[in-house]
Amino acid sequence: MVELLINFIDQYGYLALFILMFFNNVVGIIPGGLVSLAAGSFASLTHYNLIHTIMATTIGSLGGAFILYILGGLFGYNWLLRIKHVERIITKEKLDLIAEKLRLEGAHWIFIFRFFPIVGLWVSLPAGMMRMPPWIFFFYTTVGVLGWALLWQIPGYYVGLGFAKYGYYISGLLFFISIYSIYAFKKILHRIINID
C-alpha cells in the first residue's frame, strides 16, 4: 500500500494529495495520517513545497467533510433506526440526547474529534444531522483538518527518506492508533452524554 501511495503522489502531485484526502474524508480508503506523512516526506525529498502539500490535503479534507455534512443534513438521523441491528446499539432517545449535546456544545467537539483517526472522518455526518450552522462547522473543521495536516506533515518532512524505508511500520502504527481512537471516542461519547 505504501508503494502505491508513493507512486500515486509522485505521478499526480498536489492533485493526488487532494484526491486522497477528499476520498479519505468521505469513505476512509487510506489513513489520512499516512497520506499527510507521505506528503511531508515528499516535500522534503522533492520539488514539492510543504505549504502547498498542507494546503492540498486540507482543502481535500474540507471537501470530503462537506459532502458528509450535506448528506447528514439532507437525511437526518432517523434513517439510522431503520437499519437492521442499529437499534441494539443506539435508541432514538440516545440519538436525541446526542443531538441535543451537539447542538449545545458540538462545535468544539467537531474540532477535537478531527484528531481521532477514523472518528474524524465521520464526525461531519452527525454535525450535518444535528443541523450545526455551516459557518461554525466550516470554522472548526478547517482548524481541525489543518491541525491534523500539520501534526503529520511536519514530522513527515523531517523523516524524509525514512518514510519509504519504514512505511510498513508507520502503517501498522496508524492502524493501532485508529483502533485505540475508536475505543477512546466511544468512552468520551459515553461520558459526554452519560449513557449507562
Image: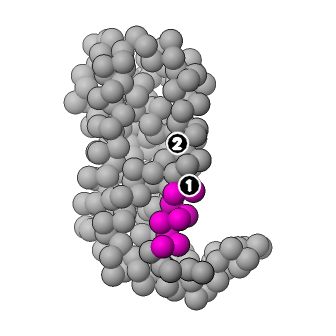
In the rendered image, residue 106, in percent from the top left (x then y), is placed at 36, 72
Q: Could you say whether the residue bearing mark 1 is in a helix, strand or loop?
A: helix
Q: Which mark is on residue 159?
A: none
For label 2, the crowd category at 10 Å Cα-Cα, with few meaning under 14, some 14 to 19 and many 20 or more, is some
Residue that lies at the very extreme toward the bottom in this rendered image: 93
Q: Which mark is on residue 177?
A: 2
Q: Could you say whether the residue bearing mark 2 is in a helix, strand or loop?
A: helix
In the picture, the quarter occupied by the C terminus is bottom right
In the rendered image, residue 53, in percent from the top left (x then y), is placed at 30, 30
For label 1, the crowd category at 10 Å Cα-Cα, with few meaning under 14, some 14 to 19 and many 20 or more, is some
Q: Is residue 27 above or below residue 10?
A: below
Res 133 → quadrant? bottom left
Q: Earlier in the sequence, mark 2 or mark 1?
A: 2
Magenta segment: does it hold 190? yes
In the rendered image, residue 140, in percent from the top left (x then y), is placed at 28, 60
| Magenta region, main secondary structure | helix
Q: Which mark is on residue 182?
A: 1
In the rendered image, residue 137, in percent from the top left (x then y), is placed at 32, 65
**Would residue 80 be found to the left or right of residue 149 on screen?**
right
Three-letter amino acid code at the position of disc 1: Ile
**Would residue 45 be found to the left or right of residue 51 on screen?**
right
Res 146 → quadrant? top left
State which region is magenta: 183-191
In the picture, the quarter occupied by the N terminus is top right
**Would residue 24 be found to the left or right of residue 134 on screen?**
right
Residue for point 22% across, 30% down: 51
